Image (tube, coloured by chain):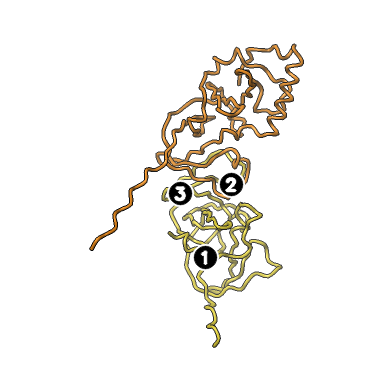
Amino acid sequence: MMAAPETALQSFVLLRLGERRFALPASQVAELVAPSRIFRFPHKSPALEGVILRRGRMIAICDIAEQLTGSRLTTRRFTLIATRKYERQLDWIAIPVSGECELINVDMVPASSNDSPHVDGWLSHGGEVIEVLRLSALTPGPVETLMPAPLHDFAEARS
Amino acid sequence: MNFPPAEKSQQPRTEQIILFRVSGQTFAISSASVQEVRSVDNIAGMARDLPESHLKKVRHSIHRGDRTLYIVNAALHFGLQPQPASLVFFLRRTRTALLIDGIEKMTTMTRLQALSHAFQGEERNWYRGLTALDQAVVPVVHPEGFLSLEELTLLEAAQSSADTHPASSENHGAKVQ
């Protein structure tokens, strides 16, 4: 007897940064919240703006728009809270976005060796070809433990 | 139907902290790490210049018992715009005397959250983590994080040089900033 083939469709969250749309695996997205106060304190991680306080948790905030679109966001409508995994530890990161987000189910074409390190794959949706982002390549973190592929076992991030 | 007895609720671990100010920024330090608090005026007569210190944040040392402590300007350590400091924390089990602007209050923290992995700079040595107090986020400093081993080696060399050149080492009562 042959095993049933895995479902090809995966869930992704589409996010808007300026004029462009990008995608993240839905399993890496914890929630989408209104922008809140950013607490700043001295540090030497220039990609980070500070932290936000969400449900008692302090979450580093990082604007990834400049790396992806060439300019920083002028309008921040929401903050997307995503998770990254380092070995067995979950690490949360807040990303400002400039528009509504959308949940879609679609098949992803994996990135090729010619794609940028931040591209995990490609989606085709609504006539657009959309990059699926690899957050570990866009946000600072311990390089030696970065997971090369997207993680799909982030259910605990939602608890 | 019998329900199992509810587990005894555990008291959250708490830690006494001192909130202090440096160039308009608030930090926290465990009160157990602070051996003594003195005013800058009070130690000015005992501080010695370290003319050959290569560390901008350390310009003076002070002898306490049989040990030499280095006076670290907290504003310069954190890369902030320095303001006239008014207090010095003598930090327990370190060789640091920390120049700060003032104390806000003593309070208790119930939770210390480790720095996110996204923070990858020197701040990983500076802070034990972050705590939330009254809907604000306060970094909790690491008492050993003000002087690295390399910095201490440089300072010891500067101190030896000051000790062997009486003309400069006699400069007691330096203005500590």
Host chain of mark 1? A
Which residue is pictured at 52% across the width and 62% down the height?
A28
Q: Which mark is residue A57?
A: 3
Q: Which mark is residue A93?
A: none
Q: Which chain is yellow?
A: A
For chain B, the rendered hue is orange
Do the residues bearing badges 1 and 3 touch, measured as CB atoms within 8 Å? no
C-alpha separation, residue under disc 1 versus residue under disc 3: 21 Å
- In the image, A37: left or right of A89? left
Element under label 1? loop
Q: Amino acid at mark 3?
A: Arg
**Tag nearer the camera, 1 or 3:** 1
Tags 1 and 3 on a common chain: yes
Q: Amino acid at mark 2?
A: Phe
Q: Is residue A86 above or below residue B9?
A: below
Which residue is pictured at 64% across the width and 32% down the height?
B147
Element under label 3? strand
Q: Which residue is mark 2?
A: B119
- Neighbourhood count class around disc 2 (C-alpha, 10 Å): few under 14, some 14–19, many 20 upward: many
In which quadrant is the N terminus of chain B drawn?
Answer: bottom left
Is residue B143 at least partly visible in the picture? yes
- Neighbourhood count class around disc 1 (C-alpha, 10 Å): few under 14, some 14–19, many 20 upward: few
Q: Amino acid at mark 1?
A: Asp
Q: Is residue A103 above or below residue B124?
A: below
Residue A39, percent from left and from top: 49, 42
Is residue B26 at least partly visible in the picture? no
Q: Which mark is residue A153?
A: 1
Q: Is residue B84 above or below residue A12?
A: above
Badge 1 or badge 3: first in the primary sequence = 3
